[in-house]
Image (spheres, helix red, strand yellow):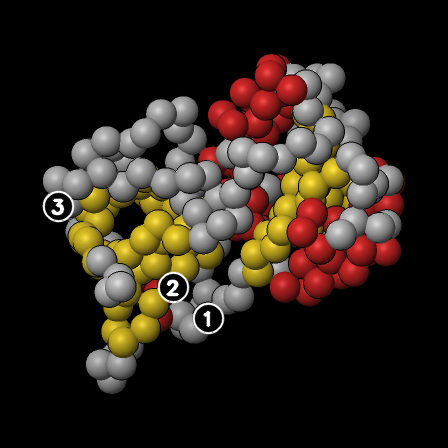
Amino acid sequence: MAIQHFPLKLVSRRMLAPTVGHYTFVRDDGQPLDFIPGQFIQVHFTYADGTATKRSYSLATIHDHALGPGEAVEIAVSYVAGGAATALFEGLEGGGRVDASGPFGRFCLMPADANKRYLLIGTGTGVTPYRAMLPQLDALIRERGIQVVLLFGARTPVELLYGDEFRAFAARHPDNFRFVPCFSRELPEPGSEQAHADVRHGYVQQYLDEFAPSAGDDIAYLCGNPNMVDACFEALKGHGLPIPQIRREKYVSSK
């Protein structure tokens, strides 16, 4: 079946980090852009020589209902120096349009899951799908009493995307949701809001063993840097998790 393209119109944008923008769009053809948290869209454009290309972006929108016509969707865009997609997004003004398709993907919480705990592991913009999953996780905590650990890797505190929202969610669910930021280069200032007890210094894969992954209890999600995804995939297999209980999505930066 041919992929259906549609226009997205920019509503607003703001910077999440020095090199990451948060973009809010509406579908501009009168149709809804509903999606399952964890899915992504593709943005289509051409290089300077006219060659067609595309980039994939996970949808970040927090929603607890089917999105209707005119309701906004959000993505996080990493800026790559000299990147064609970066030039496209940096040059986009309010009301500007991009050509998109989707949603695609199966990196989603599955209705048949009967696990006791989700291990959500991400780096950089790989945390975007977990933001969209928060309403589902809220419902699963209420309905099934699940436990959730979000291990999120960033280089520095200013690159901790959506950190305030994840901390607030953890505060609302202190017995069920742990937010564990792992900073590889720079820790938060002592006494700052970001310097809470679950902060770690290093890479997410260094701390996976601390949470004792178990085939009988856990389903793991891995999203972001391909090296992190591969390292955590091998570590989780080493803990006995079967491959169907390890769900992966790699983010590769393209020029």
Upstream in the sequence, badge 3 or badge 1?
3
- How many marks are shown on the rendered structure? 3
2 and 1 marks in contact (CB < 8 Å): yes
Q: Secondary structure at mark 1?
A: loop
What residue does disc 1 label? 254
Question: What x and y, as percent, mark residue 41?
Answer: 36, 53
Could you say which quadrant of the image residue 173 lies in? top right
Q: Secondary structure at mark 3?
A: loop
- Mark number, residue 55: 2
Could you say which quadrant of the image residue 149 lies in? top right
Closer to the observer: label 3 or label 2?
3
Quadrant showing the N terminus: bottom left
Give the spatial CA distance, label 3 vs label 2.
Answer: 21 Å
Upstream in the sequence, badge 3 or badge 2?
3
Query: Which residue shows up at 58% across the image and 35% down it?
Result: 112
Give the spatial CA distance, label 2 vs label 1.
Answer: 8 Å
Q: Amino acid at mark 3?
A: Asp
Residue 49 visible somewhere in the drawing: yes
Give the spatial CA distance, label 3 vs label 1.
Answer: 29 Å
Q: Amino acid at mark 2?
A: Arg
- Mark number, residue 29: 3
Q: Secondary structure at mark 2?
A: strand
